[in-house]
Amino acid sequence: MTPDPAAYPLLGAPFFFLRHGETEPNRLGLATGITDVALNAAGRQQAEAAAQALAGRSIDAIFSSPLKRARDTAECVAQVLGLPVSIIDEIGERNWGEFEGRPKELRVWDAQPRGGEGLDAFTQRTLRGLAKIPGGRCSLVVAHSGTFRVLCAWFGLPHRGPQVGNAHPLRLLPPATADGKWIAEPLT
């Protein structure tokens, strides 16, 4: 399914995506989901480096997940860019239920975790959040690997492979060809 730019104003132009910086559970290979954890020291440094990489990119709006790791990453960028951060609850990470705090390898992306959120519910919630982002701006979305996987599936990009790295900014470019596929371009 190709997303409709009329329903999702964000899609009218290129935009940037940034996964939050590293947390201790990330470092340990644990599923974090909706558990609200802070960045560790490495994550704070990653967020600061990402902010420098995003400086001068004509970003004029920042939207973030409400979870602390994403908010703190967004605030690092906001300080450098001199912009406020708008919180969108629906782009928070997936609730992994019984797998929260356990090794990531135990999760099954397509399965409904006990006490957690199924893939369809998570996808629909994420898309509702993305629909709240206004068009006509060059936006930065700061969120989670799960959020990025929803974007990739929606845009026809590979989403079953490795996770997007912590605090590695990407520029998402609308389709330039008839295939309708977006391009995720890492910033160097």
Image: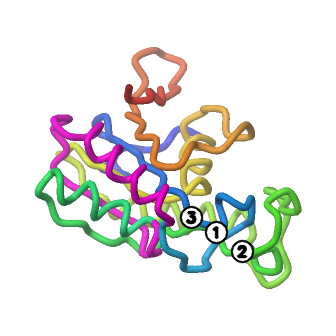
Q: CA gap, disc 3 to disc 1?
A: 16 Å
Relative side of 100 to 39, left or right: right
Q: Position of residue 108 (x, y in %)?
A: 85, 59
Q: Position of residue 34 (x, y in %)?
A: 61, 77
- Are the two marked residues, 2 and 1, in contact with CB atoms closer than 8 angstroms? yes
The outermost residue toward the front is 41
**Disc 1 target residue:** 94
Label 1 sits on what residue type? Arg
Label 3 sits on what residue type? Thr
CA neighbours of label 3 inside 10 A, class few (<14), some (14 to 19), many (20+): many
Residue 130 visible (yes or no): yes
Name the one closer to the observer, 83 or 3. 83
Give yes or no for residue 43 being in the magenta stretch. Answer: yes
Range covered by the magenta-colored residues = 40-69
Q: Position of residue 56 (x, y in %)?
A: 16, 35
- Against 60, is 68 above or below? below
